């Protein structure tokens, strides 16, 4: 099954962009995924193909019009009815690896790329299917860059795109932790040596070391992730203890 990506944008020439190279580009050539763009200006009725207007209540910048984008979204839905619709906006909920994995397991995704000061809020009220998402607490010039990043994250999880079957699972966020540190040859570089445990050949010790490093780095670098991970782990342990206790009775 082909994973179908549809992008609503003012700049269709930005796609597939970097996704036309490397593993994503090879997957595109094989037909593992498709990339279609919809020019939002095509749904404007005036001769200037206007898609934005000044903010109600005053203020700087311009706002994307709800009537134009509503028509564009409706067209995208008619083309791909079952795909989730994601609007790229810094006001959105930060997207997670869990959500990426769920999208990659479906028929495709429709991405709505914001520009200027953002969207007329009535668009989301009238089209509740649209998910407002962001990459992080940053502001970009437009949603196209964020859309490319989200597509890249999805495409690499499609069957056959990555070489090793474990490549998509032994990575940051896949188990709630940052990925453990990686090393490769040469064994010694500028006086720094690959940790001895990684050269021991003892797979059990290697796995234990990697788990410890992942937990340590997550705790120090991403306390937000660590708090979630610790909570889930504690709940699992409590559940296991309750089960053991029930079995003893």
Image (cartoon, rainbow, N blue to C red):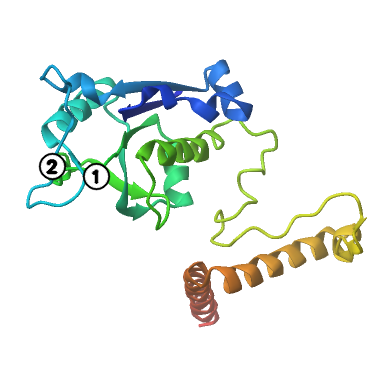
Q: Which mark is drawn over residue 199? A: none
Q: Residue at x 62, y 52 (%)?
A: 171
- Marks 2, 1: nearer the viewer: 2
Answer with left or right where residue 134 lies relative to residue 49. Answer: right
Please determine whether, in this image, residue 237 is positioned above or below residue 175. below
Q: Residue at x 60, y 73 (%)?
A: 220
Answer with left or right where residue 36 lies relative to residue 240. Answer: left
Determine whether the residue tagged by mark 2 lies in a helix, strand or loop: loop
Per the model, the C-alpha gap separating discs 2 and 1 is 11 Å
Q: Is residue 68 visible?
A: yes
Q: Nearer the viewer, residue 14 or 60?
A: 60
Q: Residue at x 51, y 76 (%)?
A: 234
Locate residue 170, reporting x and y percent: 65, 51
Task: List the residue tagged with mark 1.
Answer: 118
Please determine whether, in this image, residue 57 is positioned above or below residue 109. below
When asked about the image quadrant of residue 205, the answer is bottom right
Q: Residues within 10 Å of mark 1 (few under 14, many from 20)?
A: many
Q: Nearer the viewer, residue 28 or 141?
A: 141
- Furthest residue in direction left, as rendered: 57
Answer with left or right where residue 9 lies relative to residue 97. Answer: left
Q: Nearer the viewer, residue 208 or 57?
A: 57
Task: List the residue tagged with mark 2.
Answer: 54
């Amino acid at each position: 099954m082909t994973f179908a990506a549809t992008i609503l944008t003012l700049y269709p020439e930005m796609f597939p962009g970097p996704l036309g190279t490397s593993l994503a580009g090879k997957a595109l050539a094989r037909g593992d995924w498709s990339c279609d763009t919809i020019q939002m200006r095509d749904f404007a009725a005036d001769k200037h193909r206007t898609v934005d207007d000044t903010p109600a209540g005053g203020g700087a910048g311009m706002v994307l019009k709800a009537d134009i984008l509503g028509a564009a979204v409706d067209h995208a839905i008619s083309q791909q009815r079952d795909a989730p619709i994601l609007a790229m906006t810094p006001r959105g909920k930060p997207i997670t690896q869990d959500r990426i994995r769920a999208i990659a397991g479906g028929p495709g995704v429709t991405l709505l790329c914001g520009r200027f000061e953002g969207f007329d809020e009535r668009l989301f009220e009238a089209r509740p299917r649209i998910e407002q998402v962001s990459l992080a607490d940053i502001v970009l010039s437009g949603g196209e860059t964020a859309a490319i990043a989200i597509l890249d994250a999805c495409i690499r999880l499609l069957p056959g795109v990555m070489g090793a079957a474990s490549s998509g699972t032994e990575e940051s966020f896949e188990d709630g932790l940052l990925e453990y540190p990686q090393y490769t040859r040469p064994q010694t570089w500028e006086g720094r040596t690959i940790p001895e445990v990684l050269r021991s050949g003892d797979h059990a010790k290697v796995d234990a070391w990697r788990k410890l490093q992942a937990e340590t780095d997550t705790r120090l670098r991403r306390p937000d992730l660590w708090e979630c991970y610790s909570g889930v782990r504690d709940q699992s342990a409590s559940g296991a203890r309750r089960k053991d206790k029930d079995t003893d009775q």
